[in-house]
Every structure is written in C-alpha cells, then in structure tokens.
Amino acid sequence: MMRALAIGGFLTSLALFAVLEWLARREGSRIPTLGEMCAYVMRYEVGPVPVGRIGLFGFWWWLGWHFLAR
Amino acid sequence: MEQPRELTVEAPRAWDRPTFSIPVLACLSLVGGRFASFSTEANLYVLGTGGLLIWLGLSNRVPRRPAPTRLGSGAAWWVLPIVVFGVFEGVTFVVSAGDDFPTFSRLADPLIEGQLIRSVAWFAWLGAFWELVRR
C-alpha cells in the first residue's frame, strides 16, 4: 500500500513535469519551458562568479553520479 | 574590412550541430552503459564526462543561446511538480522503510541495471547536460 503510494507520487510528479513542458511549448503560452527556466537560473551571478551556472551544473553532475555511479 | 558585430552571423561550428553531437553523445552513452554501479570505472567516467562538460560550460568555448531576461507569469507553475517530488522524496528518505516505502533512487536502481536501459539513462543525462552547457 505504502509502496504504491510512493510510486504514484513520483509518477504524478513526473507527469506534472511532462504536462507543464507540453503546455509551455504551445504558441502564446505564458508558462516558460523547463529549458528557459534553467537558462534564467543560470543567469544569476554574484559579482564575477556565475553562481547559477555553477549550481545547476553541480546539481546535474551530482545527479548523474548518484544514479549512474552509486 | 571588419564588419560591425550586429551585421555578422556566426556560422554554427560542425561539432555544434545535432548531426555531430547526437552520435558523439550516443557513443559516450554506450560506453557508460557498460559500467556497473559502484565500480571505479563508472565513478571515473561520470567524473570525467561531467567535468569536461562543466569546463566547456564555464569557459566560453561553446556558443550559448540567449537567455530570457524575464520569465512569463506562469513560471510559478513549475513549483508544483518540484514540491510534489520533493515531498515524496523527503518523506520516503526520512521514513527509511526500504522497499515498503521506497525513495526514487531505490525505485530507479533496478530499472537501470540492464546495459541497454543504462545506456539510455546515460544518453538522457549527457544530452540534458549538453543542453545546459549551451544555455
């Protein structure tokens, strides 16, 4: 029962990502695509340090290591 | 005579085209799919490919697409799937009930054990990484 709940929750979350991306790609949509969200986050800088870029790259690197190497 | 910057169009470099990048990423993914979890090879390969992409992304060697200066008013909708995922991941992690109430990682691990699916996962990871580098 609890296992089904966890699987359902994660599948719901993934479905929401897919639906939002689909909605964002429609003409005239006010929802930005996930790529645009990432690009916006990566613009964030503190002085000369591209904090947003480093943070997102670091997160994605960790994610690959977590799933593909650990 | 030098042209003003705004009048020139930069031709895409050969290695920046999908006809080049997709086969390269596919080859890298097929190699990555051969390495089992917890192996030294897998760790070194993730560190190597990820490190190379981070170096490319932080240097100015890859042309980037223009980033939006403002987000549309619907940007807040993206909080919804992130919160749903975060709540389930957080609760399953804290409860630590193993397979009875598994975390996302515990659910994904058996799925990416096979070499083919593992290569597909590698391709998804590297492809998304390459897209981030070009943003």
Image (spheres, coloured by chain):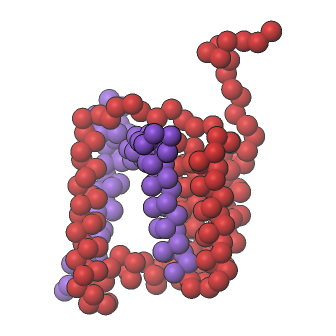
The image position of residue A41, as x and y in percent, is 40, 45
Residue B105 appears in the rendering: yes
Tell me if residue B126 comes above or below residue B56 in the rendering. below
Residue at (56% x, 78% y) in the render? A69
**Quadrant hosting residue B18:** top right
Above/below status of A14 relative to A26:
below
Residue at the spot x=54%, y=35% of the render? B65
Write down which chain is painted red: B
Give the left or right position of residue B81, taking residue A33 as reference.
left
Residue A62 position in % (x across, y down): 49, 67
Q: Residue furthest right?
A: B1
Q: Nearer the viewer, residue A27 or A64?
A: A64
**Quadrant location of residue B15?**
top right
Chain A palette colour = purple
Instruction: Report the number of numbered marks.
Output: 0
Image coordinates of residue B10 in percent, x first then y, are 69, 26
Residue under the image location 49 percent in, 75 percent down: A67
Judged left or right of residue A17, residue A46 is right
> Closer to the camera, B105 or A22?
B105
